[in-house]
Amino acid sequence: MALQAASLVSSAFSVRKDGKSNASSSFKESSLFGASLSDQIKSDFVSFSLRCKREQSLRTTGARIRAQTIVTSTPSVTRSTFDRKKTLRKGNVVVTGASSGLGLATAKALAETGKWHVIMACRDFLKAERAAKSAGMPKDSYTVMHLDLASLDSVRQFVDNFRRAEMPLDVLVCNAAIYQPTANKPTFTAEGFELSVGTNHLGHFLLSRLLIDDLKNSDYPSKRLIIVGSITGNTNTLAGNVPPKANLGDLRGLASGLNGLNSSAMIDGGDFNGAKAYKDSKVCNMLTMQEFHRRFHEETGITFASLYPGCIATTGLFREHIPLFRSLFPLFQKYITKGYVSEAEAGKRLAQVVGDPNLTKSGVYWSWNKTSASFENQLSQEASDVEKARRVWEVSEKLVGSA
Ligand code: LMG
Ligand code: NDP
Ligand code: PMR
């Protein structure tokens, strides 16, 4: 592992409490162009050169997890014997990929409310620690735990470590993702699945399947499972029509294991295309959220949600894109599509989906309009296809071995 970027969000902000659903806002305008740029909030970006080998990071992880566990197993319960109605223990929220971009901004927004303890589930332990410190997150507001979504063993190990820490799980946020727009041949996860779908969908699918029991056991008043989606997976929008378009087809590639050897590395069985693989993985994320809702909402009361936070054109997601794209894309989004949002603003949006008492409806794909008001957005036909969601679920269960 050579250079990695971490983001430092310097401006202080807190979670909005007025995020009322605004279903009457113009759907077309909002879904086509996303929400407008918030000029008040600025982000600074600091690049760290971390020349740590993955093995070194992993070696230190065990010890640090234990150390962190001791720190955080001290009671976070603030319920007073005298005033049970008003005070509530801190909520525990797991955020995957909290070492940069949206995940870090969300972790910071939640930590700053003083109401949340954030478990930052990250593949690069040191990067996450440094990102949290640089972002100014209070020391007792977070715990870093190692999670590499590109390895199902690591996912299982994370769940074991989390359970050993004996914290209740109140909210799980599946945020991490990779995007390989310039790759011309596929790379693979530890188990041999194409890397984008393997990480963004299958890793999160197993994590959520395992942690649903922990969510069920939580006594928190509003338990939530959030899977980050995107506009580019939705072909009912302009952004979703930029080629290559998402399309899961008949799932023949997924059903054959996405291994690129005796089958295609793409879900629909076609030729490898990194940008399409990412968009397909986002469709899987949005379908999975809805299938969770159908299978578990009534029985458990858990709120399942997805969202498009806006175009956060400056994050590490575009690290593999060509430099010209990386420099023009934010300008294009800011001044032409007006779909740009800062990391801080997007973090506040996701933090709303985590904790806002107005956003408890389950099965919803949230978006924000130009005045940054949340509304229930419409998914594309494919991303809301009930039968496809069921089949993606069943095939994914077979692949991750959690059936
Ligand atoms: C591919 O290219 C890449 O090959 C692939 O690697 C991957 O990145 C993929 O999707 C990701 O994209 C797409 C390529 C071709 O697009 C581009 O390369 C364009 C890059 C644009 C980004 C930078 C633009 C820079 C602009 C300059 C800005 C300067 C700064 C301004 C400063 C202002 C100062 C005041 O894309 C195309 O082929 C283009 C065709 C796009 C067509 C999309 C439109 C489809 C329309 C369909 C309409 C459907 C509408 C449905 C609406 C439904 C509503 C209910
Ligand atoms: P970033 O690249 O900044 O953040 C992605 C995070 O995922 C990083 O922390 C990264 O870790 C982590 N990650 C990647 N691979 C793994 C893995 N194998 N195991 C564990 N963690 C991993 O991108 P964004 O913040 O933009 O993306 C966050 C989410 O937002 C994604 O789900 C993306 O699809 C979604 N999104 C983004 C939009 C945008 O415009 N940027 C728009 C719509 C949705 P590390 O720091 O170690 O690299
Ligand atoms: Mg898009 C009209 C509005 C709009 C919005 C909100 C986005 C969001 N994009 C829009 C339009 C366009 N884009 C148009 C008209 C073009 C052609 C010029 C265009 C191109 C484009 C590219 C090449 N856009 C991109 C790329 C990427 O590589 C990004 C991508 O597809 O990643 C999968 C991307 C994005 N555009 C967005 C958003 C949010 C992205 C990031 C993708 C994501 O996070 O899901």
Image (tube, rainbow, N blue to C red):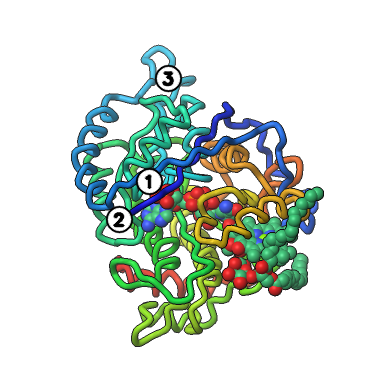
Amino acid type at image mark 3: Arg
Mark 2 → mark 3, Cα distance in angstroms? 36 Å
- From the viewer's perspective, is 122 left or right of 338? left
Q: Say if mark 2 contacts mark 1, CB within 8 Å.
A: no
Query: Where is residue 164 shown, x and y percent of the image?
Result: 22, 41
The reply to whether residue 237 is in sight is: no
* Discs 3/1, front: 1
Q: Indicate which disc, 2 or 1, sits on the residue closer to the N terminus.
A: 2
**Classed neighbour count for the residue bearing mark 1: other residues with Cα under 10 Å, few (<14), some (14–19), many (≥20):** many
Amino acid type at image mark 1: Leu
Q: Please identify the quadrant where the C terminus is shown.
A: bottom left
* Discs 2/1, front: 2
The reply to whether residue 199 is in sight is: yes
Q: Indicate which disc, 3 or 1, sits on the residue closer to the N terminus.
A: 3
Please give the residue where the numbered disc 1 appears in the rendered image: 215
Give the number of the disc on residue 231.
none
Please give the residue where the numbered disc 3 appears in the rendered image: 84
**Does label 3 point to a residue whose CB lies under 8 Å from ligand 2?**
no
Secondary structure of the residue carrying tag 3 is loop
Residue most extreme to the top: 82
Q: In this rendering, is residue 192 above or below 292?
A: below
Q: In this rendering, is residue 203 above or below 392?
A: above
Amino acid type at image mark 2: Val
* Discs 2/3, front: 2
In the foreground, 389 or 400: 400
